[in-house]
């Protein structure tokens, strides 16, 4: 297997990230281009990617939310974790998560949390998060707008 490198994403990654999230689609829409420019400009948001042979094979978004609570320590959130079908079960998601945990510690986060839909209870996603130390401590609430 090619060496897998982890890094934070850059503006030029957008077509490949869209391809990852939408199964091979390479043409970002106008809205995606504008949204990506905003994501790239935000110091509180980092999209980590895994790259193998020049191809992006995984991504995960990390958000650092400033807080007055918790002695003014920020909270980290993880969103949009995806590994391409051909590269699963090779430890890539675990490595991305550990990288994000390092980043969260460096930024002084009090805790890091994420929501994983109940439909992922048996497909490996919940097992993945448990395997790097996450615990099902809180109930997740969601309201679609
Ligand atoms: C869930 C997902 C991110 C896992 O990525 P991955 O790189 O394959 O995960 P890893 O190889 O790092 O797996 C680490 C551990 O998680 C668990 N795990 C991951 N995938 C699993 C699966 N399909 N079945 C059972 N356990 C699984 C295992 O404990 C695994 O350790 P092991 O391989 O030593 O048994 C990937 O399958 C994916 O992108 N799925 C589609 C999108 C998705 O569901 N995202 C998460 C939304 S909350």
Image: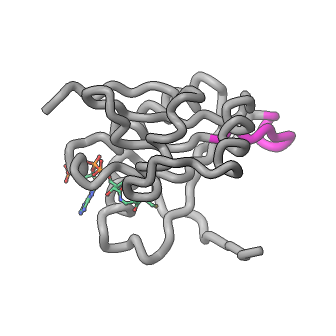
Residue 17 position, x and y percent, is 48, 43
Whether residue 42 sits left or right of residue 20 in the image: it is right
Whether residue 54 sits left or right of residue 87 in the image: it is right
Residue 83 position, x and y percent, is 35, 49
Name, please, the residue furthest toward the right: 68
Whether residue 91 sits left or right of residue 128 in the image: it is left
The segment highlighted magenta reads 63-72
What residue is drawn where x is 66% and y is 42%? 33
What residue is drawn where x is 86% and y is 40%? 68
* Nearest the eye: 2 or 61: 2
Q: Magenta stretch containing residue 79, yes or no?
A: no
Residue 4 position, x and y percent, is 27, 29
Quadrant of the rendered image containing residue 125: bottom left
Residue 132 position, x and y percent, is 37, 45
For the image shown, how many numbered marks are present on the structure?
0
What residue is drawn where x is 41% and y is 49%? 20
* Nearest the eye: 118 or 145: 145
What residue is drawn where x is 59% and y is 40%? 62
Q: In the image, ligand 1 is in what quadrant? A: bottom left
* Scheme of image coloration: one colour
In the image, is residue 28 above or below residue 48? below
Quadrant of the image containing the C terminus: bottom right
């Amino acid at each position: 297997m090619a060496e897998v490198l982890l890094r934070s994403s850059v503006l030029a990654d957008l077509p490949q990230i869209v391809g990852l999230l939408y199964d091979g689609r390479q043409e970002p829409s106008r809205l995606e281009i504008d949204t990506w420019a905003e994501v790239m400009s935000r110091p509180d948001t980092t999209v980590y990617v895994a790259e193998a042979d020049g191809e992006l094979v995984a991504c995960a978004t990390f958000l650092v939310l400033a807080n007055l609570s918790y002695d003014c320590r920020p909270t980290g959130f993880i969103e949009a974790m995806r590994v391409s079908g051909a590269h699963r079960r090779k430890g890539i998601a675990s490595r991305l998560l550990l990288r994000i945990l390092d980043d969260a510690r460096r930024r002084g986060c009090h805790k890091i949390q994420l929501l994983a839909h109940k439909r992922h209870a048996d497909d490996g996603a919940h097992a993945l998060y448990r395997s790097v130390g996450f615990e099902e401590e809180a109930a997740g609430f969601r309201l679609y707008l």
